[in-house]
Image: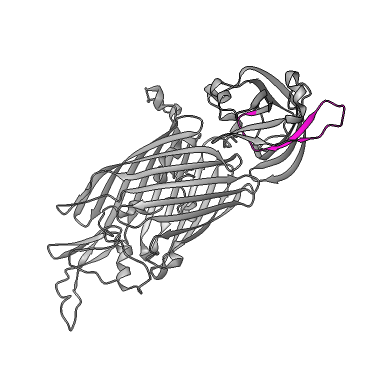
């Protein structure tokens, strides 16, 4: 690899001249080869290579990298401290994780992360610091053992433009991170990390501090399915000074969206990121659980105006094997003509594994939106298993309660435990705000909320209901309302009772936090 001795900013690192010696950034070595690569149809950002500590932009952890780096809204393992520290809040046991990155051009990277719940740290005094999860991480990036030092004095010689070797030197980068994530409410996690960054190149060194911030938010969308959105701002801080000059840190803004498909055992993720010294990136990731222990992953990362190292340089793939306390992950990433990257991660879990709780939209009700004067109805359940997947067992539940206005409710649920034998529905009065928002011309007869349904509801519900009390006279005008993000929506029911019987109706409705049986006024 030929090195240029002149002061020259390069794409993701820098070189400079000091007393005739060429000194390299710990990351620039991997990109120097770009000068001799074929010209790909990719536009170079005008600020490329203007930042220091470029190793902070290298993806952390084999699992996240194998999903194309689309991890901002996933962030559910210890490497969340590098992608989105808000994800630390979801780690409810102590973990120690290590990753070795066998990078191209003989470059290497080692990552270590340790996480623990705040309540297990006895030296913490303020109670609010014990509510979340803490993480400690080390990011170490290093060049080959020896790099040749050349003065560059003879590069202008037309006959023999090669400078003699004047010894060797080493270069390495370090970053220590301390992160904390906590649950702000049932749906929102917030986190942050402070880090100390150091670069050493031959006899030159520099250091600085930086801050990472992140947030995740879970919500129901597309028929009540559970999604998670995430955002993070990484490497916020002053520049790093080397050889009497300061260089900005690689500030990066990230946003993402993820969705679990429990019935298929799949995880989909989407990420958009914008470094200050490059064009925006779009990343897509997929994780497919083949069994309860084995997962396959793949992803693609595309840069606006094209990937600098060719189309294949955005591809990644890998796999994961999870045992009782140990998990192993592998990721492969090609980098065009300059080589490939292989990442190997191992994670050790202290204590028994805690399965993440399955959350259903009916549980996400603010105190101000709960029904008043509640009466609980218990539904006797007949359960039929439909499908077994790594995420659990999918059951078809048919619940019946003759005392409830909704006498029968049929739904599919995903459960990690045995088939449920009972669930409840609460009947009561709507809060004033929700009652005032009911469509004009309708009168609410009964208001219901589902409570205590084990597992996670999958898809729509089928509800059989009847008009009772003063509403019984308006049997032909029944309407079933359900609450959405945009307000109340109507489901038109069909009448299923025979003539002369008490009117009984059936309607298919999406998952919702509130259901109202109504008639025309």
Given residues 61 and 349, the one toward you in this image is 61
Position of residue 21 relative to residue 211, above or below, is below
Residue 391 at least partly seen: yes
Question: Picture coordinates of residue 394 (x, y %)?
Answer: 70, 41
Q: Residue at x 71, y 22 (%)?
A: 377
Q: Is residue 512 magenta?
A: yes
- In the image, which residues are magenta? 494-515
Is 251 placed left or right of 273 in the picture? left
Is 142 placed left or right of 302 in the picture? left
Q: Determine the residue located farthest toward the top in the rendered image.
A: 373
Given residues 374 and 108, the one toward you in this image is 374
Q: Determine the residue located farthest toward the bottom in the rendered image.
A: 159
Given residues 53 and 212, the one toward you in this image is 212
Q: Residue at x 33, y 54 (%)?
A: 55
Q: Residue at x 18, y 84 (%)?
A: 159
Place residue 128 in its image quadrant. top left
Viewport quadrant of the C terminus: top right
Place residue 319 in its image quadrant. bottom right
Given residues 239 and 219, the one toward you in this image is 219
Q: Is residue 123 magenta?
A: no
Viewport quadrant of the N terminus: bottom left
Place residue 397 in its image quadrant. top right
Position of residue 449 relative to residue 41, above or below, is above
Question: Picture coordinates of residue 491 (x, y %)?
Answer: 67, 36
Is 73 placed left or right of 431 in the picture? left
């Amino acid at each position: 690899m030929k090195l240029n001795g002149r002061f020259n900013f390069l794409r993701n690192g820098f070189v400079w001249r000091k007393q005739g010696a060429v000194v390299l950034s710990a990351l620039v070595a991997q990109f120097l080869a770009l000068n001799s690569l074929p010209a790909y149809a990719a536009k170079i950002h005008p600020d490329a290579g203007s930042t220091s500590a470029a190793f902070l932009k290298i993806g952390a952890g084999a699992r996240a990298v194998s999903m194309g780096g689309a991890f901002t809204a996933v962030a559910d393992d210890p490497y969340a401290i590098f992608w989105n520290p808000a994800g630390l809040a979801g780690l409810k046991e102590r973990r120690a994780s290590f990753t070795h990155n066998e990078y191209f051009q003989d470059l290497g990277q080692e990552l270590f992360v340790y996480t623990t719940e705040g309540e297990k740290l006895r030296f913490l005094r303020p109670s609010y610091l014990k509510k979340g999860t803490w993480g400690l991480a080390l990011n170490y990036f290093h060049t080959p053992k020896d790099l040749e030092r050349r003065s560059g004095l003879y590069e202008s010689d037309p006959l023999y433009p090669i400078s003699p070797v004047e010894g060797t030197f080493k270069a390495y980068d370090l970053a220590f991170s301390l992160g904390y994530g906590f649950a702000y409410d049932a749906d929102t996690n917030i986190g942050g990390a402070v880090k100390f960054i150091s670069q050493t190149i031959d006899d030159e060194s520099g250091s600085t501090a930086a801050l990472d911030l992140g947030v995740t938010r879970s919500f129901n969308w597309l028929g009540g399915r559970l999604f998670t959105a995430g955002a993070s701002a990484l490497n916020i801080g002053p520049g790093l000074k080397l050889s009497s000059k300061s260089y900005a840190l690689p500030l990066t803004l990230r946003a993402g969206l993820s969705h679990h498909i429990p019935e298929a055992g799949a995880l989909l993720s989407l990420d958009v990121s914008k470094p200050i010294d490059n064009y925006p990136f779009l990343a897509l990731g997929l994780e497919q659980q083949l069994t309860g222990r084995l997962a396959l992953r793949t992803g693609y990362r595309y840069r606006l105006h094209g990937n600098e190292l060719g189309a294949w340089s955005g591809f990644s793939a890998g796999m994961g094997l999870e045992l009782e306390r140990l998990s192993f992950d592998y990721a492969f990433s090609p980098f065009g003509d300059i080589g490939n990257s292989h990442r190997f991660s191992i994670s050790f879990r202290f204590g028994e594994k805690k399965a993440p709780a399955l959350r259903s939209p009916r549980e996400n009700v603010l105190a101000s939106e709960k029904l008043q004067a509640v009466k609980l109805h218990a539904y006797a359940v007949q359960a039929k298993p439909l499908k077994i997947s790594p995420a659990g067992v999918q059951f078809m539940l048919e619940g019946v309660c003759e005392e409830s206005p909704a006498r029968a409710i049929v739904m599919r649920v995903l459960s990690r435990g045995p088939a449920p034998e009972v669930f409840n529905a609460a009947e009561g009065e709507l809060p004033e705000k929700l009652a005032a928002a009911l469509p004009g011309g309708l009168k609410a007869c009964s208001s219901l909320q589902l409570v205590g349904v084990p597992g996670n509801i999958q898809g729509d519900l089928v509800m059989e209901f009847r008009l009772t009390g003063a509403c019984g006279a308006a049997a032909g005008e029944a309407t079933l309302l359900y609450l959405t993000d945009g307000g109340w929506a109507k489901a038109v029911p069909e009448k299923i009772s025979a003539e002369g019987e008490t009117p009984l109706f059936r309607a298919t409705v999406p998952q919702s936090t509130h259901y109202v049986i109504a008639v025309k006024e």
